[in-house]
Image (spheres, rainbow, N blue to C red):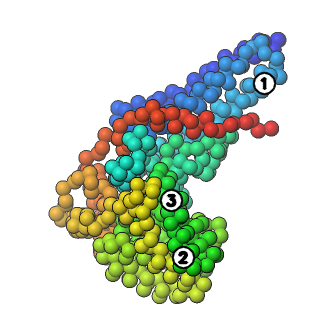
Amino acid sequence: MSSIYIQARITADLQRQVDLLPIEVATWKVHAETNLDGMGIHATQMEAINLMFDELLAIQEETLTKLMPELDPAVFIDHRQKLEYELSSAHGIIDIFRHILNQRTSYRAALDAADLVSAACYRQCIMRAYDWGVLKSDQFRAPPLTYLTAQLSPAAITRRHSFGVMGFPLAGYNEQLLPISVLSLPAYHTVGLWHYCALYHEVGHPLDQDLGLSDALWSVVARQLSIEGVEDNRVAWWRFWLREVVADIVGVLLGGASFARILISMLFAPLQLTTYLDPTDCHPNAYVRVFLVTSLLRAAGVPEAASTADAIEHEWLQIYGDPADLRPFCEDCQRLARLLLEAKLKVLNNHNLHDLVPVLLDDNAQLRALAKYFGSGNDPPIEAQHLMRLVPAAAQIAMQETGADKENYAAIHERALSYIGEIPRPASLGGSNFSDTQKAYLRGLVRQLNLTVND
């Protein structure tokens, strides 16, 4: 049997294998375009995923054209290995999205709520940047896609991350950048809409990336810390923590006291963990972080900021004391909070973060009305799209003000979840279809990776 005969059969078989993946991706896109099972809100996200796989397919087809039966066997084998590696890697990536999308079968209402709240927060801030001339319409990115994990806390995996960070087994493409940002929630947090207040922080990460907030802010912060004589060691810590600090700023401005309360619940841990300065953790030390958030509450002027901040700090000091080595960081928080909120940034056309993110002060009457309804079941406010962002914060207030009883908590959660379900949905979370510029950007992500076969 000649090598030409063997190679011809292998080539024909590989041609069919290359054709398999686009069928599944095209099905997802059709489901979004036809709004099957409520998938219409994911139209732009599905388009982003589809564009990435179109480019992966183009790469496979380029390799496939090199598989000519008459090639020298050694050369043919090299091309065949490369193509199979590309196939395995692409199917590894599709398995990640398959996992994320299939969760919507069992957790449809919970994930729809997370998607809608996240998109409402993200779009509202992005549109402010657009109004200021910071972004053009063809620079908009698809809003984050949410999914559930067994991790201890929520997380954001933005487009600066690669697929390898998600922990799925991949034969290759571990360093392939994501076409969209994804936000994860612990699956067990879906029993309480108040836990979704954590999304206020997580949305801050794609906003930071899309607008270049951290780098722009640091040039201002570093200069001020130097002027005030802050020790170099502490300056280095604040630089290390800055991306998470920016996300906390967004969390405070979107969620106010409700974000602060859910954060306290998440950070409530043994003394040695709460007060330890971990050089591997990019989040501010948990003890310090509480004082950062309370300082931000006061500086932002959100509703009930002073009383909430005072109460939280009193609770924290009673539980954890006043560690001498962390006291200077807590003092930094007081001087940093106003600077972080009010520093004028060139990337925002001389606006500040306080201007960028809507402040809950303007929404307080509606927030309190929602909280009252979630807590009592009486006098439901009229469902409106602009209230979507407030639902987790209102659920947190209702939970905080009711008796610590699981039946009460269940009723609050169900009312909040049902309320989200009644709000008229947008046709798509990401607005209109992608422009040619956006398509070129997404295809370019794939071409940035030079995939090589492992020895």
- Image side of residue 317 versus residue 276, left or right: left
- Local SS, label 2: helix
| Inter-mark Cα distance, 3 to 2 | 18 Å
Of mark 3 and mark 1, the one earlier in the sequence is 1
Three-letter code for the amino acid on which mark 2 is drawn: Ile
- Furthest residue to the left? 379
Quadrant where the image shows the C terminus: top right
Which quadrant of the view contains residue 33? top left
Q: Earlier in the sequence, mark 3 or mark 2?
A: 3
Q: What's the CA distance linking mark 3 and mark 1?
A: 50 Å
The residue where tag 3 is placed is 216
Give SS at disc 3: helix
Is label 2 or label 1 in front?
2
Where does label 1 land, which residue? 77
* Amino acid carrying mark 1 in the image: Ile
**Image location (x, y in percent) of residue 2:** 82, 11
Q: Nearer the viewer, mark 3 or mark 2?
A: 2
Q: Is residue 444 visible?
A: yes
Residue corresponding to mark 2: 227
Residue in the foreground of this view, choosing between 175 and 183: 175
Q: Nearer the viewer, residue 176 or 198?
A: 176
Residue 258 is drawn in which quadrant? Answer: bottom left
